[in-house]
Image (tube, helix red, strand yellow):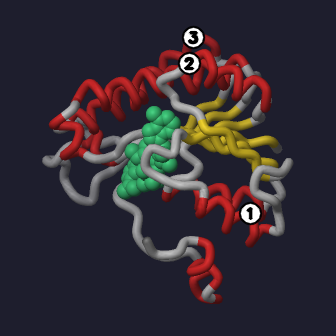
Amino acid sequence: MRVLVTGGAGFFGSHTVSVLLDAGHDVLVLDSLVSSTTVPLERVAELAGATFGGSRLRFHRADVREPTSYREAVVAFGPDAVVHFAGLKSPTESLADPAFYYTVNVAGTATVVQAAGAAGARAFLFSSSATVYGDEAPVPVGEDAAVAPVTPYGHSKLMAEQVLRHMHEAGRHMGVAVPRYFNPSGRSPRVVSGRIRRAFPPT
Ligand SMILES: NC(=O)c1ccc[n+]([C@@H]2O[C@H](COP(=O)([O-])OP(=O)(O)OC[C@H]3O[C@@H](n4cnc5c(N)ncnc54)[C@H](O)[C@@H]3O)[C@@H](O)[C@H]2O)c1
């Protein structure tokens, strides 16, 4: 399968690319590198026996705030599936610059899903966040808990979900999945063999 991973140079993205390559998929990463570098992807390619920039792991620097060039890159690749991680993730920063968060996380998600539709992708996974539940949800928080985001970041995630819901209802050409996970923790199984230290060196 051909899989586009937006924000694929980031934390979740690079781990996901690693799993996708191991499963035999061909991957394109689109990332502006605003908060990452290509180093993790170069190591991930090495671990998978692939070449960074080769046919199994392509990379193109692209910003979700530039819809025309972004769409061109997506359509040229023609993904079967899209995993959308590109975005901003600091609740504190979002309080200081809400418009930045709405532009990247909401308008940016609209750009990505439109491009995915134009490219004929059949599956779309959006990395949402448990921040959509706010601070008052009873613990443990169930998926059906009421949403009550507190920060612009949380609101931007919920709004991006709505964009995807409405796009799906309008077209129904693409399956959409939206995990709302909490902060990740734990290690890749590769740590056991020590290989992950080469893939994701401390900075
Ligand atoms: N890390 C967490 O605890 C957590 C929890 C829940 C949800 N999420 C969500 O998962 C996603 C990925 O999180 P992460 O921890 O891997 O973050 P990350 O910052 O490591 O990765 C995000 C990637 O997106 C890229 N990016 C940012 N703005 C961009 C833009 N305008 N155009 C193109 N690329 C851009 C960055 O360069 C980076 O490589 C985010 O959307 C975040 O909101 C993260």
Does the closest atom of ligand 1 sit within 8 Å of the Cβ of label 3?
Answer: no
Identified at 16% across, 37% down, the residue is: 95
Q: Residues within 10 Å of mark 3 (few under 14, many from 20)?
A: few
Residue 60: numbered disc: none
Residue 67: numbered disc: 2
Q: Look at mark 3 in the image and give the residue it sits on.
A: 170
The local secondary structure at tag 3 comes to: helix
**Residue farthest toward the bottom in the current orientation of the protein:** 193
Between 57 and 18, which is closer to the camera in this rendering? 57
- Rendering coords of residue 42 (x, y %): 68, 62
Mark 1 or mark 2, earlier in chain: 1
Left or right placement of residue 66 versus residue 198 in this view: left
Q: Name above or below for residue 117 compared with residue 185.
A: above
- Rendering coords of residue 139 (x, y %): 22, 58
- Rendering coords of residue 191 (x, y %): 57, 83
Residue 94 appears in the rendering: yes
- Rendering coords of residue 186 (x, y %): 44, 74
Specify the quadrant of the image occupied by residue 196: bottom right
Left or right placement of residue 98 versus residue 42 in this view: left
Nearer the observer, disc 2 or disc 3? 2
Q: Look at mark 1 in the image and give the residue it sits on.
A: 45
Task: Estimate the spatial distance between the alpha carbons at disc 2 and disc 3, rounded to whole Å.
Answer: 20 Å
Q: Say which amino acid is labelled 3.
A: Ala
Mark 2 or mark 3, earlier in chain: 2
Task: Estimate the spatial distance between the alpha carbons at disc 1 and disc 2, rounded to whole Å.
Answer: 28 Å
Between 138 and 167, which is closer to the camera in this rendering? 167
Specify the quadrant of the image occupied by residue 17: bottom right
Nearer the observer, disc 3 or disc 1? 1
